[in-house]
């Protein structure tokens, strides 16, 4: 699956965080998330987010209780900067497949969906979309993603004009459309127009590449043929099949040559 770290800081800041962590330990840092001081909570969650950006720390943070501490913070905190970093920490932890089931089972999706309803800052939206996108790569939790409203969050954020948000949204669509169930889920919830819109953004290469991958994968599913034809996406697929996008040309050509698409 295509997973990415979402929250990162300057190398010097990360080094300082590592030194602090070595002195106080994870449990102490988690405890600071409950401290009755906004600055203390913010610095503590930044420590966790930076540690979670490193693969070797991701499972240990969850095993030591970091997920519960982050979820408590997301549930009780009202400061958007703190919530933004907490969502970024969850996104980083979701890079690890070993953590993904626990994030879902312990209510992480519902908290991300809840945060999306009040998040107006584009960087907070990027963290939310990045966390969901990382989880979309796990075929075993696609039903939970669908049922929780997480995929609808991606559709909603696809109307944002901030390229960093759109890149995470398109990556989530691409990850979710890797298997048949994900392909049909996206069509069922009405995501196809959003994917088509992102795949047409010629000035945003990264966004467009993720969206074109999602579109090709969705169109390759026989159950989606009618929806793809109705959406007007077939013309774009024809363009992709003759384009310079080598990584997508073959996929699009296979779809375009499918006789089911030529039937009226």
Image (tube, rainbow, N blue to C red):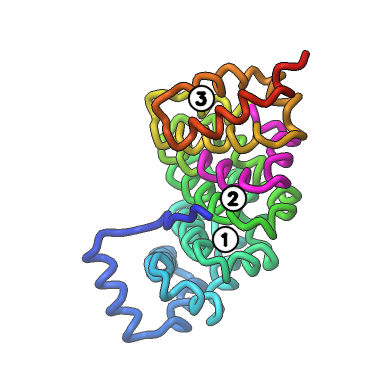
Q: CA distance from mark 1 to mark 3?
A: 44 Å
Which residue is disc 3 drawn over? 241
Residue 183, magenta (yes or no):
yes
Point out the residue furthest to the top here: 264
In space, the residues marked 2 and 1 are separated at their CA atoms by: 8 Å
Q: Nearer the viewer, mark 3 or mark 2?
A: 3
Q: State yes or no: residue 68 in magenta.
A: no
Circles 1 and 3, Cβ within 8 Å, touching? The answer is: no
Q: Residue at x 39, y 30 (%)?
A: 204
In the rendering, at what x and y percent does residue 161 appear? 45, 29
Q: CA distance from mark 3 to mark 2?
A: 39 Å
Asked if residue 43 can be seen in this view, the reply is: no
Residue drawn at point x = 51 percent, y = 28 percent: 199
Look at mark 1 in the image and give the residue it sits on.
74
Name the residue at the left extreme: 12
One can see residue 172 in this view: yes
Frontmost residue, 2 versus 255: 255
Q: How many marks?
A: 3
In the image, 240 versus 20, the foreground residue is 240
Which span of residues is magenta-colored? 169-192
The residue closer to the viewer here, 206 or 237, is 237
Residue 39 falls left or right of residue 90: left
Q: Is residue 40 left or right of residue 233?
A: left
Tell me which corner region of the image, top left, top right, bottom left or bottom right, holds residue 234: top right
Q: At numbered mark 1, what does the secondary structure look like: helix, strand or loop?
A: helix
Determine which of the numbered discs, if any, sits on residue 115 in the image. Answer: 2
Name the image quarter holding residue 13.
bottom left
- Label 2–label 1 contact, CB within 8 A: yes
Question: Is residue 75 depicted above or below 120 in this figure?
Answer: below
* Badge 3 vs badge 2, beta-carbon distance below 8 Å: no
């Amino acid at each position: 699956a295509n997973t990415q770290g979402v929250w990162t800081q300057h190398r010097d800041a990360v080094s300082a965080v590592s030194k602090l962590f070595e002195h106080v330990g994870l449990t102490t840092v988690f405890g600071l998330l409950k401290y009755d001081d906004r600055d203390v909570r913010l610095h503590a969650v930044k420590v966790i987010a930076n540690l979670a950006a490193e693969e070797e720390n991701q499972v240990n943070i969850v095993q030591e209780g970091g997920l519960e501490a982050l979820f408590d913070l997301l549930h009780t905190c009202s400061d958007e900067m703190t919530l933004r970093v907490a969502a970024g920490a969850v996104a980083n932890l979701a890079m690890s497949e070993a953590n993904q089931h626990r994030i879902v089972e312990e209510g992480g999706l519902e908290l991300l969906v809840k945060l999306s309803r009040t998040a107006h800052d584009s960087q907070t939206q990027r963290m939310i979309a990045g966390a969901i996108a990382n989880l979309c790569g796990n075929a075993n939790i696609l039903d939970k993603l669908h049922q929780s409203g997480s995929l609808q969050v991606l559709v909603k954020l696809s109307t944002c004009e901030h390229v960093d948000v759109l890149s995470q949204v398109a990556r989530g669509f691409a990850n979710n459309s890797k298997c048949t169930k994900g392909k049909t889920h996206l069509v069922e919830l009405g995501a196809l127009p959003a994917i088509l819109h992102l795949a047409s953004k010629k000035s945003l290469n990264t966004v467009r590449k993720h969206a074109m991958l999602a579109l090709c994968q969705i169109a390759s599913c026989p159950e989606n043929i009618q929806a793809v034809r109705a959406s007007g996406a077939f013309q774009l697929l024809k363009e992709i099949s003759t384009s310079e996008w080598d990584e997508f040309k073959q996929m699009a050509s296979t779809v375009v040559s499918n006789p089911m698409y030529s039937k009226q």
